[in-house]
Amino acid sequence: MEYIQDLYLEGERPLYHKKDGLRLENVTIGPGESSLKEGADIEAVHCEFNGKYPFWECDGFTVRNCIFREGARAALWYSRGCKMYDTLVEAPKMFRRISDVYLENVRMPNALETFWDCKDVTLRHVETSKADYIFMHTDNIRIDNYKLQGNYSFQYARNVEIHNSILDTKDAFWESENITVYDSRIQGEFLGWYAKNLRLVRCHIGGTQPLCYCENLILEDCSFEPDADLAFEYSSVQATVRGHITSVKNPSSGFIKAGSIGEIILDQNIKAPANCQISTNPE
């Protein structure tokens, strides 16, 4: 194991291809590219990253109490086995084509286009802002206590489980597959369109035209904001909703049970089999 402490490094590939173990402590990576590329068994503690592409094609690395400045954009791509704790990530476009990722107590205030084409991702106590298109084409995600602000999230994602989270995001879960969300708040327009096997359990939903064109949509003990109108259009759905739904439009099949529904729209544009059972049961 090689130890490097209290050092400033910059330029092209200053620590390239370190394969026999490397611990960095209080190290600053300045402007440049690919500082740790092709490395393995790396630990970075109390480090600051300013250059591009530090962790590309790496195997097995842990990051603790570090800062990735904006200049460290696209820092973690094409790698395997990343653990990150108590870290601030100011750079966008992080985590691409990376597998086996664990994040805990990480804050990402500029998470544009992050987590693309990844797999086997776990997040605990993570916050992401300005996170448009986060988790696109990413599979096998497990999340607990997550705060998301950013649109077009989880598009084309598969096999996702989310708990105890706040998702402020329009166009979330589009064309996703096998998503389950528990005990969370989801606010944003056009939630879940074209999703397959989307299941929401004890969630609170806001935003116009949610959950349309869904296949095998399940809601268990959920609730709706007043702006969540024109719900379930052309969806096959099994939904139990606490309280009021402003309006339901042309669900295709299944059942919807709610405390009350302001307007039920079943018109000439409804799609077969057009046999969804809609009922209300005031509490």
Image (cartoon, grey):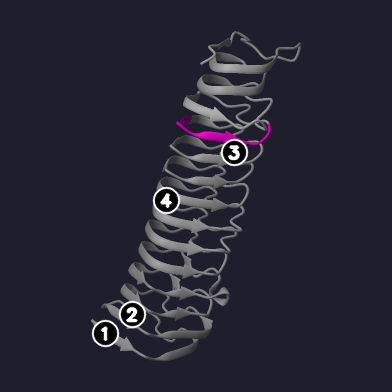
Q: Amino acid at mark 3?
A: Trp
- Residue beneath label 3, please? 174
Mark 4 and mark 1 in contact (Cβ < 8 Å)? no
Disc assigned to residue 18: 2
**Sequence-first disc among 3 and 1:** 1
Tell me how far mark 1 sits from mark 4, CA to CA.
30 Å
Magenta span: chief secondary structure: strand
Q: Position of residue 134 (x, y in %)?
A: 55, 53
Q: State which quadrant residue 17 falls in.
A: bottom left
* Gap in angstroms between the C-alphas marked 2 and 3: 40 Å
Which three-letter amino acid code belongs to the residue tagged 4?
A: Lys
Q: The magenta stretch spans which residues?
A: 199-208
Measured in 3D between alpha carbons, the distance from the residue under mark 2 to the one under mark 4, in whole angstroms, is: 25 Å
Q: Nearer the viewer, mark 4 or mark 3?
A: 3
Rounded to the nearest whole Å, what is the CA distance between mark 4 and mark 3? 18 Å
Spatial distance from mark 2 to mark 1, Cα to Cα?
9 Å
Q: Position of residue 48 (x, y in %)?
A: 45, 80
**Quarter of the image with the N terminus in it:** bottom left
Few, some or many C-alpha atoms within 10 Å of disc 1 (few <14, some 14-19, many ≥20)? few
Query: Farthest front residue?
Result: 283
Q: Secondary structure at mark 3?
A: loop
Q: Earlier in the sequence, mark 2 or mark 4?
A: 2
Residue 140 % position (x, y): 40, 45
Residue pointed to by mark 1: 2
> Counting residues from the N terminus, which is met first, the one under dot 2 or under dot 1?
1
Measured as percent of width and height from the top left, residue 232 is found at 62, 23
